[in-house]
Amino acid sequence: MGRIRVVLADDHPIVLAGIRALLNADAQVELVGEATNGGEALPLIRSVAPDVAVLDVSMPGLNGLELTERVTGECPETKVLVLTVHEDAAYVQPLLKAGARGYLLKRSAAEDLLRAVHAVAAGGVYLDPSVAGHAVGDGTATAAGSKPAETGEALSPRETETLRLIAQGFSNKEIARRIDVSVKSVETYKARAAEKLGLRSRAEIIRYAAAQGWLDALTLR
C-alpha cells in the first residue's frame, strides 16, 4: 500500500500550518492539497481524489456538513475525517449521517490525528472518545442492549460480528473473508440484525455500535 494521500481544509492559517507539519512528519502520509474554505476544498478534492479529506466544520463557503455531504456523494473513494472544536451532539450526529468516517476534536493529542487518518484510510471508523456517546443520539434507546424491546430477539454471534465490522467500515467482501462465509451470508446477517434492532441506515448502525463500545478508537484497524 502506498502513502495515504490527504487533503486538508481549515480557514485558520495557524491551524493549517500546525496540521501540515504534523502530517508531513509522518512518512506514510502525503499532503496533496490544502484549502481555506469549503468552496475551494470541493473542486480540490474532485481534482486530486485523496484517500482522506480532513475537514473543519465551520468554514466560509460550504460548511463542513455541506462539504461532507458533497464529498461522500461525489467522491465516494475519499474518506472524510472531521476535525473540529464542536463536541455536542448537534454537530456529531448530522456529520456521521452525512457520511463522515471520523470525528476528532482539535484539542486532541497530535498522535490521535495521525491515528484517525490511518484508521479512516484503512476503511475504519474513528470517533473521539469525548463524542462517541453523542453518536448514539436520540431515538436509539433500543441500542442499550442486544435485545431490543421491539422484537425481543437477541442477535446471533454472526449477526453481532457482522454488524460490528460494518460499523467499523469493512465492506461486505472484507467481512466475508474475515468470518469465512459468503458475501451473500454477510448480507443476510446484516439484514437480520438491522431488522431486529430497527436500524435503517449506516449512521444508525454506527450509533448502535458506539453505544455498545464497539468503536473504541484503539480497537479499529
Image: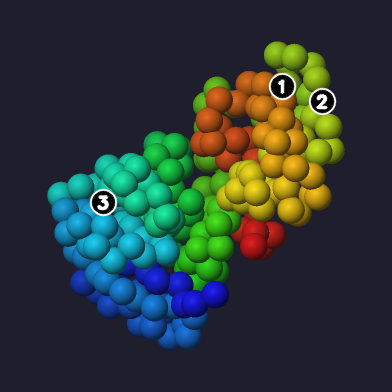
Mark 2 touches mark 3? (CB < 8 Å): no
Pointer 1 local density, CA inside 10 Å: few below 14, some 14–19, many at least 20: some
Q: Are marks 2 and 1 in contact (CB under 8 Å)?
A: yes
Q: Position of residue 179 (x, y in %)?
A: 79, 49
Task: Name the amino acid, label 1.
Answer: Lys
For the residue pair 221 and 87, the one nearer the viewer reads as: 221
Give the SS element for disc 2. Answer: loop
Quarter holding the C terminus is: bottom right
Q: Amino acid at mark 2?
A: Ala
Residue count near mark 3 (Cα–Cα under 10 Å), binned few <14, some 14–19, many ≥20: some
- Circle 3 sits on which residue? 58
Identify the residue at image location x=53%, y=30%. Answer: 201
Q: Is residue 106 visible?
A: no
Q: Tell me the number on the disc at residue 196.
A: 1
Q: Using the image, determine if residue 2 lies above or below residue 200.
A: below
| Relative to 122, 77 lies left or right | left
Secondary structure of the residue carrying tag 3 is: loop
Query: Which residue is at a point 29% across and 66% down the rendered structure image?
Result: 48
Q: Quadrant of the N terminus?
A: bottom right
- Cα–Cα gap, marks 2 and 3: 41 Å
x and y percentages locating residue 120 in the rendered image: 51, 59
Could you say where residue 73 lies in the image, as x and y percent from the top left? 35, 43
Q: Which residue is mark 2?
A: 154
Label pair 1/3, CB-CB below 8 angstroms: no
In the image, taking residue 42 as reference, residue 123 lies left or right, namely right
- The answer to which of marks 2 and 1 sits earlier in the sequence is 2
Seen in the picture, residue 151 relative to 121 is either above or below; the reply is above
Residue 126, percent from left and from top: 55, 56
